[in-house]
Amino acid sequence: MKKLLICRHSHAVGHDARGDFYRDLDKTGKHIAALAGERLAELNIVPELVVSSPAVRALRTAEIVSARLGYLPERIVSDMCIYEQDTAEVLALLQNICTGETTVMLFGHIPSVRMLAAYLSGTPEAHTPPGAVTALEFETAATWQDAFSEKASVAFRLTL
């Protein structure tokens, strides 16, 4: 079985002159990211690979959550296709970098995280507030190639 946890970045500061890409988490966002990490730790989630959009708010969310799960933040892989929100490219990225891992976490943005979860599970798009996590399970998949050729079940949705 393979597990993919799809996470929306947490609450971010407003737009400023530096642009959307450089928006960091606000105080609430940092708190929610820490809570999400703590809840996932209580569920014994142990990612073997964490992948994130390189946008500051997504990467910072990934770092905070990962630290709570014992995953070293410097091991996070980031790729621009997640920020650019191209579902086909994100799937291709995951197929290329996921090897023997059982549990992978992906941190990104709306609407792509919502669309990706719906596409992979065959379910309607769900409300996905900042900091939300959708956990998908590919029950019969031995490899990630197998996983993306079957429909996942939604194991849980975490919203804070």
Image (spheres, grey):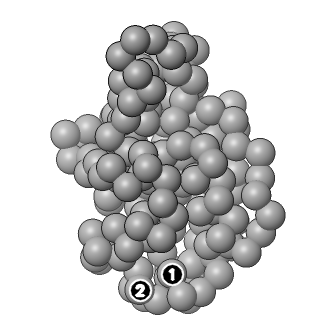
Residue at image position (65%, 53%) is 114
Mark 2 highlights which residue? 145
CA neighbours of label 1 inside 10 A, class few (<14), some (14 to 19), many (20+): some
User: Seen in the image, is 143 located left or right of residue 12?
Assistant: left
| Above or below 119: residue 19 | above
Residue at disc 2, secondary structure: helix
Q: How crowded is mark 2: few (under 14 residues within 10 Å), some or many (20 or more)?
A: some
**Residue 122 appears left or right of 24:** right
**Placement of 124 over or under 149, stated as above or below:** above
- Whether pointer 1 and pointer 2 mark residues with C-beta atoms closer than 8 Å, the reply is yes
The foreground one among 85 and 97 is 85
Q: Can residue 70 be seen in this view?
A: no
Seen in the picture, residue 151 relative to 80 is either above or below; the reply is below
The residue that appears at 57% across and 78% down in the rendered structure is: 138
Kindly identify the amino acid type of the residue bearing the numbered disc 2: Gln
Residue 34 in picture, x, y percent from top left: 49, 26
Q: In this view, does 41 lie above or below 135?
A: above
The residue that mark 1 highlights is 148
